[in-house]
Image: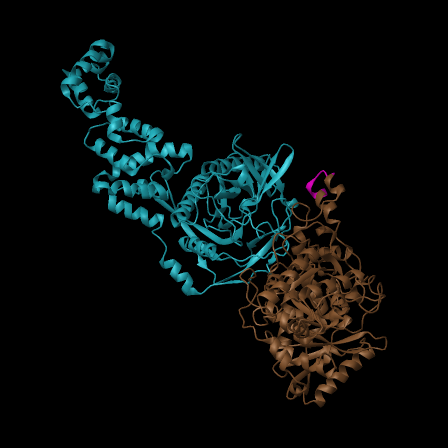
């Protein structure tokens, strides 16, 4: 099957050999998408994508002599899916919310521009949890996304559409965004690689904000090398995003390709005692411990570390994330942004109008706006937001201390494998705990990755979570690749 | 009936004192907006037309989902200038916060401002008080912080319309200490602050366009009491005169409320300049909770002290320094020099005028013309001298003609009015209007003689010792000569004739 090739490299080789063209590949993906009932996509950009693919196909022959210009256009002819939280000029961008059902942005997100400038083709906009708030992709105004292989289960969230689309071969790779685990969790549930780079690595310009101090764009792919390549293309300082950092971007793709199992030797792998707690599925626990053993037998040094403030991670995360969300979502008031339902047009006062417009948000979004509004209100700010910000600093220090002794920290991505649709949607707290292992790295702004290492007895994927120090994507990719090789993934 | 206020028994004989603190929004004259590349200001001569509504916006100032602010360094530079010129300490680390409220012209649902860590703090400026500006008073400046402006709402024909051209325009808010005690002091403070920001070139100073807007916090208390009374905040007054009048009205209103035994409430009020009244906009209880928190999209603003010092070194001559120099260099009184230098364009115009043909000796006369007739016309029309038909040579020419007695001061005022209306050349206007002063004794003598002959009653009065009637004769003679007579010469001649 043309669209089940594992890596961008393989596809480029097929382009070179003349056995495949960008146009054929793009068409095949659209066929797969259309015959699928995963509900992974909200909007397809078929015309736009086919036009891009056609041009690239012509260029390949006429301009590039049939050889993919890998240096200049490293993503030449690679069809991608874009999470519907990222803006594309002239393409409806909904954030999976009824509120933005009719929103057509007049500009394109920096990350998407960079990918397309590198030759990538955007197939369309992927389903997600509304405003990226959720861990199961059940919070979409456009319906739940189904797990790629188990239709009664969730793909994880919030980048559930991205997870399923990549795993079900709807596209080569996809963009997700990660605030507390929204790339890593669905990657783990869907059995693919998901990477959240360091906060400040990739411009957030054009990423519709959920929690600005945590949000980060990242790739979801079938291999560590593809994730590394996408990340490398998107990374770099952007004058439009003041929080991007001027830190050199390495050739991470080459790093991934060159890494061998042998590179496990001397790798110092930290295992935090706080991450191996009661409540983790035995199968998950065993899979991760077995991978740790494999690393050890290949020469890695396994070091027990401690991250003492981990127990406060979920609660502080939810204070900060909901506070920022309540602020970021203020603009959806029906005046400039936000659909005006017909009841709102009958409103007599401005306040009444706001009430009617804003009741259009989904239940989880409303819950978070209300919590965040409370946490920021005068009299409570010190006890909640300020306190959470202080705890966050302590969590950063925890990691800094741990990284004195180790190169990477590993853990499960989530305590369980993909759960059933509806299983946790009535219990927000239970749902929030799904992200217990991914949240700390988000709070500290660290680069982290999910790599599939095993499947449980039902055939559901188990991901290993790797965390590296700030701006050490190089180490993360190297370690991730070792794990991928040890797990018998992409050769 | 005895009434208590601030722990004191007060009645109609109690002397009250007004306590005033001002918050001034100064629009910074940067080319682009504070957080986006959109055009920020009208270029000279450009006017606001319907077609240009929402033209100066990008996705950032329109608050499109996914957009992020990127701080305009020029705006920071300008804000630092404002701080340095008002003797503030510049905080090397300051923080932008989000101030939340819902309103149709606020696209993001929050305004980016500075809250607990502003850019500038602990400054002051000196104001001049008294008839001749002989008394100096120091007014404390609590803080100067940077923020973005909101858009503009227009309510008409049953619709509310929003124009986002102003959204994201850079502002500094200059917050004073409650150090002012009268409307005059508030007026002097505003004029001085205005003089400083326009002199720095960081503000276009167009009051009609809202480049310089003032909120006044006003309270009253029995004189001698150190506690503060309940204050009212009067919002958004954009004329110095109206601020003074609003404060005057508000202080008296508060005094009446207190004396009537009623309870004053802390509230926000608006000033209606037509009725010269303030009225309630919202009470404190209804006041919003702005839910300030540090904007996660913007890193703290961190400056090097060398940056601040190089800005300090590049500051222009400030109004106070300029005033002192004008006193020394042009022998102007402190009062005149103060008035001239309170308006940057007038000050520059004055210097140009005086520099023409090295006319230092003309300085005092040029100053008088500028402060007097020309100043009045400019103020009434609210036009900057640069935009008017006045040219520097007009005033040097006029001053020269006054000093060599070719025209009278009265005639000069007429010329100023003509120049204001149509521009032109002074000597041509003087000739055309026949304003050359009659310095010829022989021409004046018969005219005075006729007046004396026609007014025997007044002649009698003079002889009875009523010197005042001299004025009557001079006035009549002026009238007869259509103001062209040299007044000094006329006076001398009248006395001579009456005595003779």
- Given residues B373 and A268, the one toward you in this image is A268
* Image quadrant in which you'd find residue B377: top left
- In the image, the chain rendered in brown is A
| Quarter of the rendering containing residue A25 | bottom right
- Image coordinates for residue B329, horizontal then vertical, percent: 24, 46
In reply to whether residue A351 is colored magenta, the answer given is yes
Question: Within the magenta stretch, is there residue B223?
Answer: no
Please tell me in which quadrant of the rendered image residue B9 appears: top right
Query: In the image, residue A15 lies at what x, y percent?
Result: 66, 71
Residue A45 visible somewhere in the drawing: no
Residue A145 in percent (x, y) is at: 79, 62
Is B386 on the left or on the right of A286, as rendered?
A: left
Query: In the picture, which chain is cyan?
Result: B
On the rendered structure, is B2 left or right of B338? right
For the N terminus of chain A, the image quarter is bottom right
Magenta region: A346-352
* Residue at the spot 62% in from the left edge and 70% down from the top edge: A231
Res A53 seen here: yes
Q: Nearer the viewer, residue A33 or A25?
A: A25
Q: Is residue A326 positioned above or below B280 on the image? A: below
Relative side of A267 to B446, left or right: right
């Amino acid at each position: 099957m043309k669209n089940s090739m594992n890596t961008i490299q393989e596809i480029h080789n097929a382009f070179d050999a003349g056995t495949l063209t960008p146009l054929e590949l793009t068409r095949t993906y659209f066929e797969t998408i259309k015959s699928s009932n995963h509900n992974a996509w909200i909007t397809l950009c078929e015309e736009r994508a086919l036009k891009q693919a056609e041009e690239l196909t012509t260029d390949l022959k006429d301009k590039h002599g049939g050889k993919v210009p890998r240096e200049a256009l490293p993503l030449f002819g690679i069809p991608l899916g874009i999470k519907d939280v990222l803006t594309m000029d002239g393409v409806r961008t909904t954030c999976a919310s009824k509120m933005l059902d009719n929103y057509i942005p007049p500009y394109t997100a920096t990350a998407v521009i960079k990918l397309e400038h590198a030759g990538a083709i955007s197939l369309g906009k992927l389903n997600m949890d509304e405003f990226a708030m959720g861990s199961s992709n059940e919070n979409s105004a456009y319906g739940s996304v189904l797990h790629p292989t188990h239709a009664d289960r969730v793909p994880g969230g919030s980048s559930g559409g991205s997870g399923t689309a990549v795993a079900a071969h709807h596209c080569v790779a996809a963009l997700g965004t990660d605030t507390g685990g929204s790339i890593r969790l669905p990657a783990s549930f869907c059995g693919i690689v998901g990477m959240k780079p360091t906060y400040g690595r990739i411009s957030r310009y054009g990423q519709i904000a959920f929690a600005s101090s945590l949000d980060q764009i990242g790739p979801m792919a079938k291999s560590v090398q593809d994730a590394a390549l996408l990340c490398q293309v998107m990374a770099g300082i952007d004058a439009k995003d003041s929080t991007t950092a001027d830190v050199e971007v390495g050739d991470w793709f080459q790093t991934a390709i060159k890494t061998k199992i042998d590179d496990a030797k001397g790798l110092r792998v930290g295992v935090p005692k706080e991450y191996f707690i009661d409540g983790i599925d035995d199968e998950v626990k065993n899979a991760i411990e077995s991978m740790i053993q494999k690393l050890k037998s290949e020469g890695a040094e396994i070091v027990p570390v401690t991250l003492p403030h981990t127990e406060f991670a979920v609660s502080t995360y939810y204070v900060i994330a909901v506070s920022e969300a309540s602020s970021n979502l203020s603009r959806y008031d029906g005046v400039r942004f936000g659909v005006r339902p017909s009841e709102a047009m009958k409103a007599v006062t401005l306040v009444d109008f706001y009430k009617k417009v804003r009741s259009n948000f989904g239940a989880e979004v409303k819950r978070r706006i209300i919590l965040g509004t409370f946490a920021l209100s005068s009299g409570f700010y010190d006890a909640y937001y300020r306190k959470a910000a202080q705890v966050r600093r302590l969590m950063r220090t925890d990691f800094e201390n741990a990284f004195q002794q180790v190169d990477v920290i590993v853990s499960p991505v989530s305590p369980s494998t993909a759960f059933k649709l509806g299983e946790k949607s009535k219990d927000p707290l239970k749902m929030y705990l799904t992200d217990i292992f991914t949240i700390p790295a988000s709070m500290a702004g660290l680069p982290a990755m999910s790599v599939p290492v095993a499947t449980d007895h039902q055939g559901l994927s188990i991901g290993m979570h790797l965390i590296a120090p700030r701006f050490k994507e190089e180490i993360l990719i190297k370690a991730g690749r070792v794990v991928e090789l040890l797990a018998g993934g992409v050769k | 009936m005895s009434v208590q206020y601030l722990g004191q028994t007060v009645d109609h004989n109690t002397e009250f004192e007004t306590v005033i603190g001002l918050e001034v929004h100064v629009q910074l004259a940067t080319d682009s907006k504070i957080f986006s590349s959109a055009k920020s200001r009208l270029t000279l001569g450009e006017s606001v037309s319907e077609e240009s509504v929402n033209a100066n916006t990008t996705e950032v100032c329109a608050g499109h989902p996914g957009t992020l602010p990127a701080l305009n360094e020029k705006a920071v530079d300008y804000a630092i200038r404002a701080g340095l010129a008002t003797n503030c300490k510049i905080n090397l680390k300051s923080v932008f916060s989000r101030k939340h409220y819902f309103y149709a012209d606020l696209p993001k649902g929050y305004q980016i401002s500075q809250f607990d860590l502003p850019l500038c703090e602990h400054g002051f400026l000196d104001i001049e008080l008294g008839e001749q500006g002989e008394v100096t008073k120091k007014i404390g400046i609590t803080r100067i912080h940077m923020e973005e402006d909101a858009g503009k709402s227009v309510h008409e024909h049953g619709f509310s319309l929003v124009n986002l051209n102003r959204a994201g325009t850079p502002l500094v808010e200059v917050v004073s200490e409650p150090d002012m005690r009268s409307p005059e002091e508030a007026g002097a403070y505003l004029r001085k602050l205005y003089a400083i920001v326009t002199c720095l070139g960081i503000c276009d100073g167009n009051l009609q366009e809202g480049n310089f807007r003032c909120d006044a916090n006003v309270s009253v208390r029995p004189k001698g009491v150190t506690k503060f009374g309940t204050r009212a905040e009067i919002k958004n007054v954009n004329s110095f005169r109206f601020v003074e009048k609003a404060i005057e009205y508000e202080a008296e209103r508060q005094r009446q409320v207190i004396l009537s035994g009623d309870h004053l409430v802390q509230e926000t009020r608006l000033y209606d300049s037509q009725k010269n009244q303030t009225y309630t906009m919202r009470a404190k209880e209804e006041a919003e909770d702005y839910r300030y928190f540090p904007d996660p999209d913007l890193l703290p603003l961190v400056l090097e002290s060398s940056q601040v010092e190089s800005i300090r070194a590049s500051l222009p001559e400030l109004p106070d320094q300029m005033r002192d120099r004008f006193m020394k260099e042009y022998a102007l009184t402190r009062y005149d020099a103060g008035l001239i230098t309170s308006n940057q364009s007038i000050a520059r115009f004055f210097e140009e005028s005086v520099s023409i043909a090295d006319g230092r000796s003309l300085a005092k006369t040029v100053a008088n013309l500028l402060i007097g007739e020309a100043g009045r016309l400019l103020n009434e029309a609210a036009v900057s001298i640069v935009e008017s038909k006045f040219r520097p040579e007009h005033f040097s020419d006029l001053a020269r003609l006054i000093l060599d007695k070719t025209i009278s001061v009265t005639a000069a005022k007429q010329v100023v009015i003509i120049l204001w209306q149509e521009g032109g050349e002074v000597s041509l206007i003087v000739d055309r209007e026949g304003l050359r002063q009659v310095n010829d004794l022989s021409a004046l003598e018969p005219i005075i003689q006729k007046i004396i002959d026609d007014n025997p009653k007044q002649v009698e009065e003079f002889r009875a010792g009523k010197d005042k009637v001299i004025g009557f004769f001079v006035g009549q003679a002026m009238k007869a000569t259509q103001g062209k007579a040299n007044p000094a010469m006329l006076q001398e001649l009248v006395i001579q004739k009456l005595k003779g």
